[in-house]
Image (cartoon, rainbow, N blue to C red):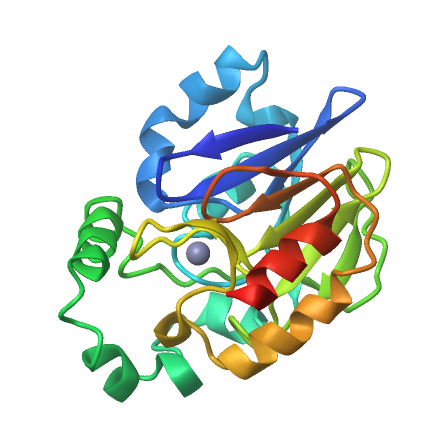
């Protein structure tokens, strides 16, 4: 498993017998270094057979078009396919009135600035994604199992790569708060979630997954069983 991206946003490559699955696709600006980043790992975009998305937010879908054009299938949970096809403002806890109350936070402006520079603030529509459901075993390199973890978005999912001993959780929880920079396992800031209450409830769905490493959309890898990370997130 390879971690790519920036200090703010991660995306991952899973190698399986020389075939690759990308999990999430970062910010659009990552395209500038995409081929060089892959070449460093001994790969090119042509090796990426599939891109599986934890959710449709603009900081996780940036390279979708580029990877699709290079031949990758693009897969997402049916609950987030509409917002991938037609990006817009998030509802619920992340709706504009809630977001406006948070604008005093310098960290929010840092995130907005980083996203704007990298083109993630205004995600482009993506058509042509295949959809999956909770519990599916995906027929892509690494053969991950889908664990639907709604809350950050309606169709948010985690992926369990059993043979790799890895659980990719997307934004079901992060290990570094992208707004405050505070470290440690935690659910995403409330005003970025459709339902923070549902985010907390979804943690239970990841608790019994056996993995040696947990990989999030934001922050460092968590080494150890997911249950310990989830206990830490709940305690916060
Ligand atoms: Zn994110």
As rendered, which of 169 and 55 lies closer to the eye? 169
Tell me: residue 176, above or below residue 163.
below
Q: Is residue 177 left or right of residue 213?
A: left
Does any portion of residue 81 appear in the rendered image?
A: yes
Where residue 44 appears, as percent x and y from the top left, is 55, 20
Q: Is residue 92 left or right of residue 110?
A: right
Does any portion of residue 75 appear in the rendered image?
A: no
Residue at the far front: name it: 235
Q: Is residue 68 left or right of residue 7?
A: right
Tell me: residue 42, above or below residue 217.
above
Tell me: residue 154, above or below residue 75.
below
Q: Quadrant of residue 43?
A: top right
Residue at image location 25% in from the left, 88% down from the top: 97
Where residue 206 appears, as percent x and y from the top left, is 74, 61
Image quarter where the N terminus lies is: top right
Tell me: residue 17, above or below residue 146.
above
Q: How many marks?
A: 0
Where residue 146 appears, as percent x and y from the top left, is 77, 59
Question: Where does ligand 1 appear, by image quarter?
Answer: bottom left
Residue at image location 42% in from the left, 27% down from the top: 34
As rendered, which of 4 and 104 lies closer to the eye? 104
Q: Quadrant of residue 161?
A: top right
Residue at image location 37% in from the left, 46% down from the top: 27
Residue at image location 54% in from the left, 34% down from the top: 70
As rendered, which of 148 and 231 lies closer to the eye? 231
């Amino acid at each position: 498993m390879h971690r790519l991206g920036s200090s703010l946003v991660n995306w991952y490559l899973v190698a399986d017998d020389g075939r690759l699955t990308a999990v999430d696709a970062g910010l659009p600006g990552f395209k500038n270094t995409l081929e060089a980043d892959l070449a460093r790992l001994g790969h090119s975009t042509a090796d990426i057979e599939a891109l599986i998305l934890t959710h449709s937010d603009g900081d996780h879908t940036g390279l979708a078009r580029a990877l699709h054009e290079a031949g990758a299938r693009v897969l997402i949970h049916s609950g987030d396919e509409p917002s991938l096809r037609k990006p817009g403002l998030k509802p619920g806890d992340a709706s504009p009135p809630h977001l406006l109350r948070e604008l005093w936070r310098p960290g929010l402006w840092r995130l907005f600035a980083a996203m704007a520079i990298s083109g993630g603030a205004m995600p482009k529509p993506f058509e042509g994604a295949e959809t999956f459901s909770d519990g599916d075993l995906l027929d892509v390199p690494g053969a991950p199992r889908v664990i639907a973890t709604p809350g950050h978005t309606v169709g948010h999912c985690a992926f369990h790569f059993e043979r790799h001993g890895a659980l990719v959780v997307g934004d079901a929880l992060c290990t570094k708060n992208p707004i405050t920079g505070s470290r440690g396992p935690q659910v995403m800031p409330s005003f970025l979630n459709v339902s923070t209450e549902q985010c907390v409830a979804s943690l239970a769905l990841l608790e019994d997954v056996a993995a040696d490493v947990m990989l999030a959309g934001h922050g460092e890898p968590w080494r150890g069983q997911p249950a310990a990370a989830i206990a830490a997130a709940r305690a916060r």
